[in-house]
Structures are given as C-alpha cells and as structure tokens.
Image (cartoon, rainbow, N blue to C red):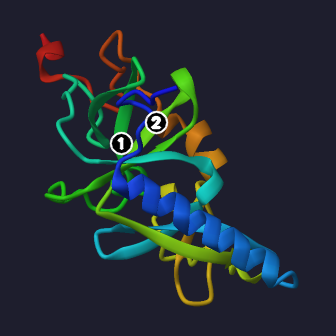
Amino acid sequence: GRMSERERFDDDARALLDARTRAVARASRAAVVTGEAALALTVAGERYAIAAHAVRAVAELTRLTPLPHAPPELAGLTARGGVVVPVFHLRGVLGVHLGALPEYGRVVFLGEGLDAVGLAVDAVSDGGAIDLAALRTTPLATAPRARDVVRGVTPDGVVVLDHQALLASDRLTVDIAAPPADHGARPSPERYR
C-alpha cells in the first residue's frame, strides 16, 4: 500500500539506514571484529556514538513545544506517530554545558511508544562499526552524570553511549501532566515569615 507521510523517512533517515546496512555488511565481512554498527552524534564539538539498532528514527530539529517548569535539559515536546515525545538536549543529559540549540540540529529517537524519547544533537552521521572489545573505560574527566550512560570510549576518543541506560535514566523522564518536583531546591524565600 502507499506509505503515509509519517512512514516516509526523510533523507537523513534513509542515509542512516544505508549507513547501517553498510556497517552491518562491513562487520560481517570482518568476522573477527566484534563490531556493532553505530551512528556518530556530534554535540558541542564532541563526538559520541550510539548503537544504530537502538535508533528508531532521525528527524530534523524543527519546532518543539516548550513545557513550562521543565528541567533545563528538556528541549521541548514533539509529536511522533500520534504520541507526544519529550526531546532532551543530549549535552544536558551528559552534564555538558548547555549552549544555544544549533540552528540545523537533528533529533535522534530512541525507544518505542510511550517510552520513546528524542535526543537533540548537532549532527548525525555514519559511525561505522565500533569494536566493543576495544572500548576503554570512561575517563575521569567525564562529567559524573555522564558516566552511568556511557559504555566506554573508543581508541580514537569517541564516547559510546549506552542506549539502554539512557532509556532507563530518570534524567530522560518528564512528568508531562504536572510540573516536576524541584529536586534539591533551597527553601523558597517566601517561607521565612
């Protein structure tokens, strides 16, 4: 049957699927390598990678609906397939300084249905195959909040994200119904009467 607008991937997504196919073909040719097809994400000039199979789609970073009282790492909400999906700044989730949103960013979607989340990044490209056996442990310089969502660092310095830890992370949950509780807030000044 004809594909609906929703099912038609944009060019980015098609390029990524091609890249994923190529990476899988490469990995199977080099049977010795315990490679995993990856997408390369650029955030604030830093290079990250995430397992290609974990990424459901990639879209242009277009209008996001802001959410009042949201934590700073929440970029906003978008609708995808009739479901409201929160989009987070990957740099905020990783504890990297939050700069301005890039003008031509991308959103990488992980998870399914009501568990879906989007990650706002600067750019996405083919990450090739990543040799998980060659990953080094995360350097101590990494922001502490990033360590629990990182699988390791490749020999050439790409930080490999753990998509399962990201999806499970409480930093990627937002209560859309009510303003989130303000964790660790000092008592508000009105209280001293």
**Which residue is depicted at the point 33% across and 11% down?**
178
Element type where label 2 sits in the image? strand
Percent position (x, y) of residue 169?
A: 56, 40
**Among numbered discs 1 and 2, the one appearing first in the sequence:** 1
Percent position (x, y) of residue 116?
A: 51, 31
Percent position (x, y) of residue 154?
A: 62, 82
Depth order, front residue of 15/107: 15
Dot 2 corresponds to which residue? 117
**Which residue is depicted at the point 61% across and 37% down?**
168
Q: Nearer the viewer, mark 1 or mark 2?
A: 2
The image quadrant that residue 123 belongs to is bottom left
Instruction: Point out the residue furthest to the right here.
Output: 32
Q: Judge from the rendering whether residue 167 lies leftward or rightward of residue 137; answer left or right.
A: left
Find residue 125 and name its label. Answer: none
Dot 1 corresponds to which residue? 88
Depth order, front residue of 149/129: 129
Q: Amino acid at mark 1?
A: Phe
The answer to whether one can see residue 137 in this image is no
